[in-house]
Amino acid sequence: MQYGKVEICGVNTSRLKLLSESRKQELLKTIKSGTPQEKKRARDEMINGNLRLVLSVIRRFVGRGEAPDDLFQVGVIGLIKAIDNFDPGLDVRFSTYGVPMIIGEIRRYLRDNNAVRVSRSMRDTAYRAMQIKEELTAKNNREPTVEEIAKLMDMPKENVVLALEAVVEPVSLYEPVFSDGSDTVYVMDQIGDKNDDTTWLEELALKDAISALSDREKRILTLRFFRGKTQMEVASEIGISQAQVSRIEKNALDSIKKNM
Protein backbone atom coordinates (compact mmCIF):
# COMPACT_ATOMS: atom_id res chain seq x y z
CA MET A 1 0.00 0.00 0.00
CA GLN A 2 1.52 3.27 -1.11
CA TYR A 3 -0.09 6.48 -0.01
CA GLY A 4 0.51 8.23 -3.32
CA LYS A 5 -1.18 5.60 -5.52
CA VAL A 6 -3.86 3.86 -3.49
CA GLU A 7 -7.47 4.99 -3.40
CA ILE A 8 -9.53 3.76 -0.46
CA CYS A 9 -13.28 4.21 -0.29
CA GLY A 10 -13.11 6.75 -3.09
CA VAL A 11 -10.48 8.85 -1.28
CA ASN A 12 -7.32 9.81 -3.13
CA THR A 13 -4.78 9.26 -0.37
CA SER A 14 -2.16 11.40 -2.09
CA ARG A 15 -4.36 14.44 -1.50
CA LEU A 16 -5.01 13.87 2.18
CA LYS A 17 -3.84 16.86 4.18
CA LEU A 18 -1.69 16.74 7.29
CA LEU A 19 -2.24 18.81 10.41
CA SER A 20 0.53 20.26 12.51
CA GLU A 21 0.61 19.23 16.16
CA SER A 22 -0.25 22.77 17.23
CA ARG A 23 -3.27 22.81 14.91
CA LYS A 24 -4.45 19.48 16.30
CA GLN A 25 -4.32 20.87 19.82
CA GLU A 26 -6.30 23.93 18.76
CA LEU A 27 -8.98 21.79 17.13
CA LEU A 28 -9.21 19.42 20.10
CA LYS A 29 -9.71 22.34 22.49
CA THR A 30 -12.42 23.76 20.22
CA ILE A 31 -14.15 20.37 20.11
CA LYS A 32 -14.32 20.38 23.90
CA SER A 33 -15.23 24.00 24.58
CA GLY A 34 -16.42 25.68 21.37
CA THR A 35 -19.93 26.49 20.19
CA PRO A 36 -21.92 23.68 18.51
CA GLN A 37 -21.01 25.00 15.04
CA GLU A 38 -17.37 25.47 15.98
CA LYS A 39 -17.25 21.96 17.44
CA LYS A 40 -18.65 20.43 14.26
CA ARG A 41 -16.22 22.27 11.98
CA ALA A 42 -13.27 21.44 14.23
CA ARG A 43 -14.31 17.78 14.48
CA ASP A 44 -14.63 17.44 10.71
CA GLU A 45 -11.23 19.05 10.15
CA MET A 46 -9.66 16.85 12.82
CA ILE A 47 -11.05 13.70 11.21
CA ASN A 48 -9.99 14.66 7.68
CA GLY A 49 -6.58 15.78 8.90
CA ASN A 50 -5.82 12.41 10.55
CA LEU A 51 -6.86 9.99 7.82
CA ARG A 52 -3.20 9.37 7.00
CA LEU A 53 -2.79 8.19 10.59
CA VAL A 54 -5.51 5.60 9.94
CA LEU A 55 -3.71 4.50 6.75
CA SER A 56 -0.42 4.06 8.60
CA VAL A 57 -2.14 1.80 11.14
CA ILE A 58 -4.13 -0.41 8.74
CA ARG A 59 -1.00 -1.27 6.76
CA ARG A 60 -0.09 -3.86 9.38
CA PHE A 61 -3.46 -5.59 8.95
CA VAL A 62 -3.46 -5.78 5.14
CA GLY A 63 -3.00 -9.31 3.81
CA ARG A 64 -5.21 -11.03 6.38
CA GLY A 65 -8.09 -11.59 3.97
CA GLU A 66 -9.91 -8.34 4.73
CA ALA A 67 -10.48 -5.64 2.12
CA PRO A 68 -8.40 -2.49 2.71
CA ASP A 69 -11.58 -0.43 2.17
CA ASP A 70 -13.28 -2.19 5.09
CA LEU A 71 -10.24 -1.86 7.34
CA PHE A 72 -10.01 1.83 6.51
CA GLN A 73 -13.66 2.46 7.40
CA VAL A 74 -13.29 0.58 10.68
CA GLY A 75 -10.07 2.49 11.42
CA VAL A 76 -11.87 5.79 10.87
CA ILE A 77 -14.45 4.73 13.47
CA GLY A 78 -11.59 4.21 15.92
CA LEU A 79 -10.18 7.62 14.96
CA ILE A 80 -13.54 9.30 15.65
CA LYS A 81 -13.77 7.60 19.04
CA ALA A 82 -10.26 8.81 19.87
CA ILE A 83 -11.15 12.38 18.89
CA ASP A 84 -14.36 12.34 20.93
CA ASN A 85 -12.65 10.92 24.02
CA PHE A 86 -9.29 12.70 23.94
CA ASP A 87 -8.54 15.08 26.81
CA PRO A 88 -6.64 18.17 25.53
CA GLY A 89 -5.37 18.69 29.07
CA LEU A 90 -3.16 15.61 28.80
CA ASP A 91 0.47 16.30 28.02
CA VAL A 92 0.59 13.79 25.15
CA ARG A 93 0.38 13.94 21.38
CA PHE A 94 -2.93 12.94 19.83
CA SER A 95 -1.34 10.13 17.82
CA THR A 96 -0.06 8.55 21.04
CA TYR A 97 -3.66 8.22 22.21
CA GLY A 98 -5.28 7.69 18.81
CA VAL A 99 -3.18 4.81 17.47
CA PRO A 100 -4.18 2.29 20.20
CA MET A 101 -7.84 3.31 19.76
CA ILE A 102 -7.67 2.69 16.01
CA ILE A 103 -5.90 -0.63 16.51
CA GLY A 104 -8.49 -1.70 19.10
CA GLU A 105 -11.37 -0.94 16.75
CA ILE A 106 -9.76 -2.93 13.92
CA ARG A 107 -8.98 -5.86 16.19
CA ARG A 108 -12.60 -6.00 17.35
CA TYR A 109 -13.71 -6.07 13.74
CA LEU A 110 -11.29 -8.88 12.92
CA ARG A 111 -12.40 -10.87 15.97
CA ASP A 112 -16.03 -10.62 14.87
CA ASN A 113 -15.01 -12.09 11.52
CA ASN A 114 -12.65 -14.70 12.95
CA ALA A 115 -13.22 -18.24 11.74
CA VAL A 116 -12.43 -19.59 15.22
CA ARG A 117 -15.74 -19.49 17.07
CA VAL A 118 -15.91 -18.31 20.65
CA SER A 119 -19.08 -18.66 22.71
CA ARG A 120 -21.38 -15.63 22.68
CA SER A 121 -21.28 -15.23 26.47
CA MET A 122 -17.46 -15.27 26.54
CA ARG A 123 -17.30 -12.85 23.61
CA ASP A 124 -19.72 -10.48 25.38
CA THR A 125 -17.62 -10.67 28.54
CA ALA A 126 -14.46 -9.86 26.59
CA TYR A 127 -16.02 -6.92 24.76
CA ARG A 128 -17.44 -5.51 28.00
CA ALA A 129 -13.99 -5.82 29.60
CA MET A 130 -12.36 -4.01 26.65
CA GLN A 131 -14.97 -1.27 26.83
CA ILE A 132 -14.30 -0.75 30.54
CA LYS A 133 -10.56 -0.81 29.86
CA GLU A 134 -10.90 1.98 27.29
CA GLU A 135 -13.07 4.05 29.62
CA LEU A 136 -10.65 3.69 32.55
CA THR A 137 -7.64 4.41 30.31
CA ALA A 138 -9.24 7.62 29.05
CA LYS A 139 -10.26 8.62 32.57
CA ASN A 140 -7.03 7.83 34.43
CA ASN A 141 -4.50 8.24 31.58
CA ARG A 142 -3.14 4.75 32.24
CA GLU A 143 -4.11 1.18 31.52
CA PRO A 144 -6.19 -0.36 34.33
CA THR A 145 -5.27 -3.62 36.03
CA VAL A 146 -7.28 -6.79 35.54
CA GLU A 147 -8.41 -6.48 39.14
CA GLU A 148 -9.87 -3.03 38.48
CA ILE A 149 -11.72 -4.26 35.40
CA ALA A 150 -13.02 -7.36 37.17
CA LYS A 151 -14.25 -5.28 40.13
CA LEU A 152 -16.37 -3.08 37.88
CA MET A 153 -17.72 -6.16 36.10
CA ASP A 154 -18.42 -7.88 39.44
CA MET A 155 -16.82 -11.15 38.41
CA PRO A 156 -13.65 -13.11 39.23
CA LYS A 157 -10.55 -11.80 37.47
CA GLU A 158 -9.84 -15.31 36.16
CA ASN A 159 -13.05 -15.16 34.12
CA VAL A 160 -12.07 -11.80 32.67
CA VAL A 161 -8.60 -13.03 31.70
CA LEU A 162 -10.02 -16.19 30.11
CA ALA A 163 -12.53 -14.21 28.06
CA LEU A 164 -9.93 -11.72 26.85
CA GLU A 165 -7.47 -14.45 25.89
CA ALA A 166 -10.19 -16.26 23.94
CA VAL A 167 -10.66 -13.38 21.52
CA VAL A 168 -7.06 -12.18 21.17
CA GLU A 169 -4.93 -13.41 18.31
CA PRO A 170 -1.17 -14.02 18.84
CA VAL A 171 1.03 -11.03 18.00
CA SER A 172 4.79 -10.93 17.52
CA LEU A 173 6.70 -8.67 19.90
CA TYR A 174 8.52 -7.32 16.86
CA GLU A 175 5.35 -6.45 14.97
CA PRO A 176 5.24 -2.71 14.15
CA VAL A 177 2.40 -0.76 15.76
CA PHE A 178 2.94 2.71 14.33
CA SER A 179 5.41 4.62 12.18
CA ASP A 180 5.50 8.34 11.44
CA GLY A 181 8.00 7.94 8.61
CA SER A 182 11.20 8.08 10.63
CA ASP A 183 10.45 6.33 13.93
CA THR A 184 8.73 2.96 14.32
CA VAL A 185 7.01 1.77 17.51
CA TYR A 186 6.90 -2.01 18.00
CA VAL A 187 4.70 -4.14 20.24
CA MET A 188 7.62 -4.82 22.58
CA ASP A 189 8.07 -1.05 23.05
CA GLN A 190 4.68 -0.87 24.78
CA ILE A 191 5.51 -3.53 27.37
CA GLY A 192 6.85 -2.47 30.74
CA ASP A 193 9.68 -4.21 32.60
CA LYS A 194 8.52 -5.13 36.10
CA ASN A 195 11.85 -6.51 37.41
CA ASP A 196 12.69 -3.42 39.43
CA ASP A 197 15.65 -4.91 41.33
CA THR A 198 17.01 -7.38 38.79
CA THR A 199 17.13 -5.57 35.48
CA TRP A 200 19.98 -6.36 33.18
CA LEU A 201 21.28 -2.80 33.57
CA GLU A 202 21.89 -3.44 37.28
CA GLU A 203 23.27 -6.92 36.76
CA LEU A 204 25.82 -5.82 34.17
CA ALA A 205 26.66 -2.69 36.20
CA LEU A 206 27.97 -0.81 33.21
CA LYS A 207 28.69 2.32 35.22
CA ASP A 208 31.16 3.85 32.79
CA ALA A 209 28.92 3.33 29.76
CA ILE A 210 25.83 4.65 31.54
CA SER A 211 27.66 7.71 32.90
CA ALA A 212 28.45 8.74 29.32
CA LEU A 213 24.75 9.07 28.49
CA SER A 214 22.88 12.36 28.51
CA ASP A 215 20.56 13.21 31.40
CA ARG A 216 17.50 12.58 29.24
CA GLU A 217 18.78 9.16 28.15
CA LYS A 218 19.51 8.21 31.76
CA ARG A 219 16.06 9.33 32.85
CA ILE A 220 14.30 7.37 30.12
CA LEU A 221 16.27 4.18 30.85
CA THR A 222 15.56 4.59 34.57
CA LEU A 223 11.82 4.99 33.99
CA ARG A 224 11.72 2.11 31.51
CA PHE A 225 13.92 -0.53 33.15
CA PHE A 226 14.01 0.38 36.85
CA ARG A 227 10.46 1.63 37.36
CA GLY A 228 8.81 -0.67 34.81
CA LYS A 229 7.00 2.04 32.84
CA THR A 230 5.83 1.58 29.25
CA GLN A 231 7.09 3.94 26.56
CA MET A 232 3.69 5.59 26.46
CA GLU A 233 3.86 6.31 30.20
CA VAL A 234 7.41 7.65 29.85
CA ALA A 235 6.36 9.88 26.96
CA SER A 236 3.51 11.31 29.02
CA GLU A 237 5.76 12.00 32.01
CA ILE A 238 8.56 13.62 30.03
CA GLY A 239 6.37 15.45 27.54
CA ILE A 240 7.56 13.98 24.25
CA SER A 241 6.09 11.47 21.79
CA GLN A 242 6.29 7.71 22.23
CA ALA A 243 8.21 7.49 18.95
CA GLN A 244 10.83 9.88 20.36
CA VAL A 245 11.10 7.79 23.53
CA SER A 246 11.61 4.69 21.38
CA ARG A 247 14.37 6.37 19.36
CA ILE A 248 16.19 7.81 22.40
CA GLU A 249 15.97 4.48 24.24
CA LYS A 250 17.37 2.60 21.24
CA ASN A 251 20.23 5.07 20.79
CA ALA A 252 21.08 4.89 24.50
CA LEU A 253 21.18 1.10 24.50
CA ASP A 254 23.29 1.07 21.33
CA SER A 255 25.69 3.48 22.99
CA ILE A 256 25.99 1.25 26.05
CA LYS A 257 26.69 -1.80 23.87
CA LYS A 258 29.41 0.03 21.95
CA ASN A 259 31.12 1.05 25.22
CA MET A 260 31.02 -2.41 26.76
Image (cartoon, helix red, strand yellow):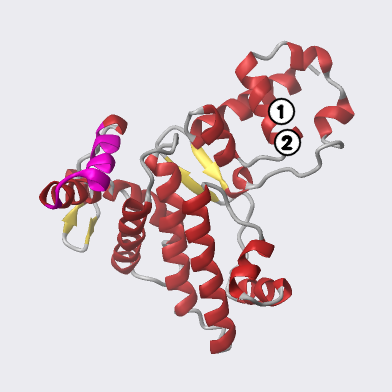
Closer to the camera in the image, 192 or 58: 192
The image shows residue 250 at horizontal and vertical percentages of 62, 29
Label of residue 230 in the image: none
Residue type at mark 2?
A: Arg
The one of 150 and 245 positioned closer to us in this rendering: 150
User: Label 1, label 2: how many angstroms apart (C-alpha)?
Assistant: 7 Å
Query: Which badge, 1 or 2, is on the more N-terminal residue?
Result: 1
Residue occupying image coordinates x 83% and y 33%: 200
Q: Quadrant of residue 194?
A: top right
Q: Is residue 30 magenta?
A: yes
In the picture as drawn, the residue positioned furthest to the left comes out as: 37
> Relative to 44, is 167 on the left or the right?
right
Side (left or right) of 64 relative to 121: left
Q: Please give the residue where the numbered disc 1 appears in the rendered image.
A: 222
- Number of marks drawn: 2
Mark 1, Cα crowd under 10 Å, few <14 / some 14-19 / many 20+, is: some
Q: Residue at x 32, y 54 (%)?
A: 84
Magenta stretch: helix, strand or loop mostly: helix
19 sits to left or right of 10:
right
Residue numbers of the magenta segment: 23-36
Q: Is residue 4 visible?
A: no
Which label number is shown at residue 227?
2
Name which residue type carries label 1: Thr
Query: The residue tagged with tag 1: helix, strand or loop?
Result: helix
Residue 33 colored in magenta in the image: yes
Image x and y of residue 234, in percent: 59, 34
Residue 152, visible in the rendered structure? yes
SS under mark 2 = loop
> Residue placed at 65% from the left, 70% from the top?
150
In front of the other: 139 or 73: 139
